[in-house]
Image (spheres, rainbow, N blue to C red):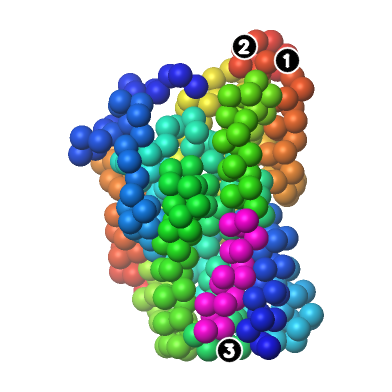
Amino acid sequence: MILLNLYLSFAKVGLFTFGGGYAMLPLIESEIIHGRGWLTVREFTDIVAIAEVTPGPIAVNSATFVGYRLAGVLGGIVATLGVVTPSVVIVLALAMLAKRFENSAGLARVKSGMRPAVVGLIAAAALTVARVALVDLKSMMMAAAAALLVFKVKLDPIVVLAISGLLGAIIFS
Amino acid sequence: MDSRFAADSEPCEGHGPKTGVPPEASIAALFWTFFRIGAFTIGGGYVMVPLIQRDIVERRGWIDKDSFVDVLAIAQTAPGPLAVNTAVYVGYTLRGIWGAMASVAGCILPSIIIILVVAALFDQISSSNYVQAAFAGIRPAVVVLIVSAAIKIGRPVVRSRVELSLAAAAMVLVAFVRVSPALVVTAAAAYGLLARSTADNGGKDA
């Protein structure tokens, strides 16, 4: 019944993760390491490092990795489905509600408060990433180069990420 | 919400958001758009914001700028990964339940494939200098991309002093005080509901 337990454990992690992937890490720690004893702290640290540097949401990456370690490819898939199930259900419910009250004055007022806050949250995310990303002169020059590509050349974000990765492999290795 | 801010949008390949009528989004198009986004979201959900904005708001014109902010608000208030929440909401809005399922599948499939490969080759990959160096190069670019998203998203939304104060307060609370984003969005929603009209008074009670 490892698959069922994986699914349930990660559904719990998904349900209580608010505000992005990093918020989920302590939950995984308490649920998977201390609760279930499925991983050691050292394995968990490796997983976090991998999840950070591979594409995809950190919650999804961690779930796939832990599931694979415990029960192979099927385990990876089951754990991932578990972690996204609460999101899918809750966001669908919210989307349906928003559609129903689309034209209500109350919802318009709610939005008028929420929208500026969301802009603030995105700015906060930039600050958080900047703290670990802009650590020396080289990385700041990389940021300046990226700013040139984004604001002046107006390149697609995906192209900017690809170029930066390539430049990084040359400059930092 | 009537204005489309057409002046500063750049319609691409003839189906930009200029008409105001969202072009039809097929299930396959939703899947591939989110697959692309999932494949390039490195280091957490916020990297996805500029990518998704470029693809869904600017390129496809599926969702207008104002609604995109609402999508982000809901994605940040609900539990779960930001990228997955956004995929569910955008997919549902455009094509109902199946649209939501296709978008989520597209969004998480690249992670699943990549992580399964990485898990199998774990030791070789994590010790590669080139891989580490590439990510050291990507991280500064991520900062720039998120800043550019904040500017683009903020321009139509933050127009008065009240709105600027709200945005600044949200940023400080989340970045420095470490308040949960869900709490901040909920509090801002309550403020909007209770304040008479933040849109009209143009900063009177800032």
* Res. A115 mark: none
Side (left or right) of A7 relative to B102:
right
Q: Considering the image in quadrants, where does the N terminus of chain A appear?
A: bottom right
Do callouts 1 and 3 point to residues on the same chain? no
Find disc 1 in the rendering and name its residue: B196
If the image is split into quadrants, where does the C terminus of chain A sit? Answer: bottom left
Q: Amino acid at mark 3?
A: Ala
Task: Report the residue marked by disc 3.
Answer: A71
Of circles 2 and 3, which is in front?
Answer: 3
Q: What chain letter is assigned to the residue under label 3?
A: A
Given the image, on which type of amino acid does mark 2 rest? Answer: Asp
Q: What is the chief secondary structure element of the magenta stretch? A: helix
Marks 2 and 3 close (CB-CB < 8 Å):
no
Q: Do the dots labelled 1 and 2 sit on one chain?
A: yes
Q: Quadrant of residue B38?
A: bottom left
Nearer to me, B174 or A57: A57
Q: Residue at x 70, y 32 (%)?
A: B189
Whole-percent x and y of residue A151?
34, 38
Tell me residue B70's x, y (percent): 56, 36
The residue located at (41%, 68%) in the rendering is: B110
* Chain holding disc 2: B
Is residue A85 within the magenta segment? yes
- Identify the magenta region: A74-89
CA distance separating discs 1 and 2: 9 Å
Side (left or right) of B71 relative to A158? right
| Residue B200's disc number | 2
* Residues at marks 1 and 2 touching, judged by CB atoms closer than 8 Å: yes
- Name the residue type under label 1: Arg
